[in-house]
Amino acid sequence: MHLSDGTLRRSLDEPVALDGRSRGHLESCARCQSRLTGVAADAAGAGALFASPQPAVDVEAARMRLAAASGAGPATRDRSVRHAPAPRRPLGAWGGRVMAGVACAAAASVLLVVSGGAQDFLSLFQPSQFAAVPVSATDVRSLAGLTGYGTVTGGSTPFRITAEASAAAAGELAGIPTPVMPVPAGVSGAPRYAVVNGTVVSFTFQAELARAAAARAGGQLPAMPAGLDGSTLTVSINPAVVISYGLDVSALYKGGGSLPSSGPAIVVVASRTPTVSSTGVTVEQLENYLLSVPGIPAGVAAEIRAIRDPEQTVPIPIPIDLASASAVNINGAPGLLIGDSTELGSVVLWQHNGVVYVVAGTVSAADALGIARSLH
Amino acid sequence: MVDSRVAPVRAVPFVNLRPSRPSVQSTSTGFERLFTAEYARVTAIAGRVLGDQAAAEDVAQDVFLDLHRRFGDDPGAQAPAWLHAAAVHTALNAIRSRRRRGAREEQFAADAPPAGDPQAAVEAAEMRREVRAALARVPAKDAMVLALRYSGLSYAETAAALGIGVSGVGTRLRRAETRLRKEVIDASL
């Protein structure tokens, strides 16, 4: 029996929802595969039509506006709010790894900084804020193709997570004060400390590879600005200190570890802001060029262009199928709140005084924000 | 094109709310936590329909005020679904009433933030105009599922807002995308 239109449509967005029987049928049925092509084309067309910049929302200002409009209690807010116990959520080993992955992805996103400087000499900068760029699953696949436009040499030293006995020891090893925070409500066990070593990653743009990648995407490269071919971006990632509750990050990284049987898992990461050096082209040239190469969805390109200050703002791709993001204020510093639409967890990231902070956990967005605001 | 097929959208969403158990903590109410967690998303949903940030925030404010007026400080576990549905209803009503008044489409884009690239800004404005025009023409059910899904809601969240089963979302979305394609093609002929 052939698959329904609805099943085919859902398989594009939530492929894991397809049961084994349906998956087997789809793999062997030319008719359903052909129908799927049409369904995907319509979905892509709709996606392009709806792709648009998602401006930042100032939730605090909105809260005040609502309070003024209602003239009563709904929006009044006690800033000393304590964190509610996290709701119990089924969390298997897979879920825990997803959360660890969310935390690592958020941290890695911070490091995926593109900077530039005046031609032919090195320049350094430190990004000061983050902006969400909503992307679809299709967009993510297209963006991944960017690695075909150059070579990435990753890590002068491989990433390593080392467990430390105390906050002081972790801070000393990482070269950054370990953040102090009250024990979040609902967690079980004592905090664990770990350090992630620093490393250096470089991306070198190569015209020859780029031409081949563009041809595979069915297009041609636009004219290159002078100095682009062979230009290199080098990202220096500083050591990070990690505090975790309900989760042994170092053991998890090595493929072991256990997850809390009850209560949330929470990870807090702090690292000095990564620095980026570049040779060859300016950040504007590089950004505009990469966004114009074949294979980049027009909607994503428009969203990234909409970020007004590319040299100081880190665009962070947020898959619209999995998460949503909003601008938040963490004790005066602009940040991003990323909510997982599967309700597995939330992530908050911000920068303050040259340090990038990430809070991730199997907690609600409000609780993640509360934890972030409690750090000092 | 006259949107004669479009039935008026109800201002009151249809998701039933149940009072939740009293909160065990705390100095913050369920409504406040809901506001923090959902305000950006409700604004995004309205923004997908309206293509205008200021108008989307107006809708979000109205929707949250309405929720609090109806259900107080502890609106219950189904409040997010209620908010999502209310945001789409209210935003669709806004674009349809404007169309009926014959307002020029460009007026919606007047407050759009300036982009660095003029060409990109023109293309983005054109895309917003196409979306609003198409959403105003397709049946309300189709417009609902498109706005919810392309605001980033999962199938489960979309189903909750629509008051249908999760398995029905794909069918409704497929139908809506087909109609949307036809509307856009028709409009371009």
Image (cartoon, coloured by chain):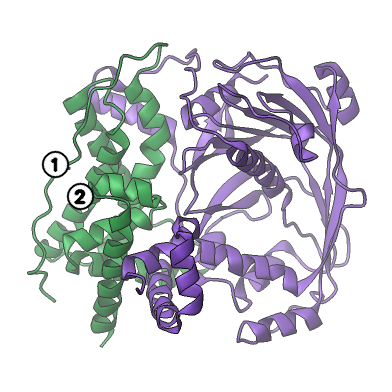
Chain colours: A purple, B green
**Image x and y of residue A94, in percent:** 61, 42
Does the rendering let one see residue A161?
yes
**Image x and y of residue B128, in percent:** 34, 65
**Image x and y of residue A68, in percent:** 28, 25
Quadrant holding the N terminus of chain A: bottom left
Amino acid type at mark 1: Val
Q: Is residue B42 left or right of residue A345?
A: left
Q: Residue at x 11, y 69 (%)?
A: B3
Residues flagged by tags 2 and 1 on a common chain = yes
Q: Secondary structure at mark 1?
A: loop
Q: Is residue B84 above or below residue A192?
A: below
Contact (CB < 8 A) between labels 2 and 1? yes
Badge 2 crowding class, 10 Å Cα cut-off, few under 14, some 14 to 19, many 20 or more, is many
Amino acid type at mark 2: His
Quickly name the residue at label 1: B12
Q: Is residue A373 above or below residue A129?
A: above
Q: Residue at x 25, y 46 (%)?
A: B85
Quickly name the residue at label 2: B89
Judging depth in this view, the residue of A340 and A38 nearest the camera is A38
Q: Chain of mark 1?
A: B
